Amino acid sequence: MQKMPHVVIIGGGTGSYVVASGLSRMPVRISMLMTMVDDGGSNKIIRDEFGLLPTSGIRQAIVALSDNQTLLRKLFTYRFHQGGEGLKGMTFGNLFMAAMADIMGSQKEGIKETCQLLQVRGNIIPTSYDDVRLVATYEDGSQVVGEHHIDEPSHDGKLKITHLETKPQAKLNPEAKQVLLDADLIIFGPGDFYTNTIANLVVGTIAKTIKKSKAKVLFITNLMTKYGETYNYTAKDFFQDLTKYLPLELIDYVLINSNFNYPPQTIPLYEKEGSIPVKDNLKPSDLNNHVKLIRTDVLSRVMPTKDTSDHLKRSMIRHDSNRLATAIMKLLKK
């Protein structure tokens, strides 16, 4: 019997959810390595009130890979519409995992038990269990502490991030290290570039571990720029910043969406937030003829609806999970 290829998705948030959702229907073994640095929205309550690491990324990953089609799965995504300042906007899944951590005696065991209960097909592993904060340094020398403040800035969001780190330094989870060494394909992106993608790459020895792995590495570029993280970035800017944290020789593929027929009603809304479509200006010469450039239509035709009790900004223009999965499977067959 042929062994199923092992795909490791590194990130957090909606982007990783979209990738995992498509691959969950494919003949692959999936592991998701997730950041645990979010400190906004309901995650702020999880950190401040319960003393736990944030769980929203883990919760989305569980839903993406869950085979449980009962009411429990739907309940896991439920967001409270009322309940005052403490409960309104909180997801049931985050509260569930906080309770499970208490029952099981640790957040690590709580996550494992939750995955079993939701019949998760694959592994969901925090990149690190260390309690740390992201620290971004900008081109003017200023610094901002905290994922939420980087992601939704009160400072000038046009400033370029020149360096990202965690304080204190986060150690790579040994389980995450083993998964990377065992992988056939490692996927970075799409998603918030600095607070999800790069946030994983500044954890401990992750880049050195990837160098030791036999896996190929795929980077999926974002569809839109983001005020506060990647203001006016082109595809070339994304790639060049990625190579500051992951050496060029470790990257094998870059996947760029080729369909720019975005829903016209969404563009003015993005522009109000300082975001525009990512310009595709990558050339083979930018990749040192080492990285293979893949251009294909991976744009979703469905515009998601936002929960009225969700106070955080969410992307309206997204990748299509099935189209992404098809493109990824073609790489695995090669």
Image (cartoon, rainbow, N blue to C red):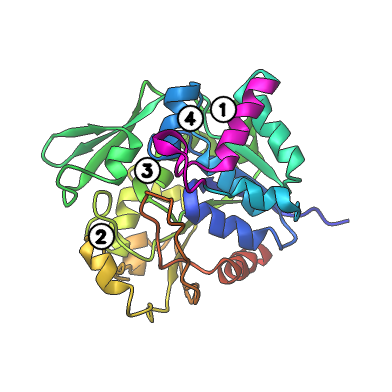
Q: Tell me what residue is drawn at x 14 percent, y 34 percent.
A: 142
Q: Residue at x 37, y 60 (%)?
A: 287
Of tags 3 and 1, the one toward the viewer is 3
Q: Is residue 81 magenta?
A: yes
- The amino acid pointed to by label 3 is Thr
What's under tag 1, amino acid-wise? Asn
- Quarter assignment of residue 20: bottom right
The secondary structure type at the circle numbered 2 is: loop
**Residue 51 at x, y percent in the picture:** 48, 21
In the rendered image, residue 317, in percent from the top left (x then y), is placed at 41, 68
Q: Earlier in the sequence, mark 3 or mark 1?
A: 1
Residue lying furthest right: 1
Judging by the rendered image, the residue that carries numbered circle 2 is 233
Disc 3 to disc 1, C-alpha distance: 18 Å
Viewer-nearest residue: 109 or 24? 109
Q: For the residues marked 3 and 4, what is the alpha-carbon distance in whole angstroms?
A: 18 Å
Give the residue drawn at x 71%, y 62%.
25
Magenta residues, as a range? 80-103
Q: Mark number for residue 173?
A: 1
Please tell me which of labels 3 and 4 falls first in the chain: 4
Give the CA distance from mark 2 to mark 1: 31 Å
Residue density around tag 4, few if under 14, some if 14–19, many if 20 or more, within 10 Å = many
Q: Would you identify the image quadrant in which residue 161 lies?
A: top left
Q: Is residue 11 found inside the magenta-colored segment of the image?
A: no
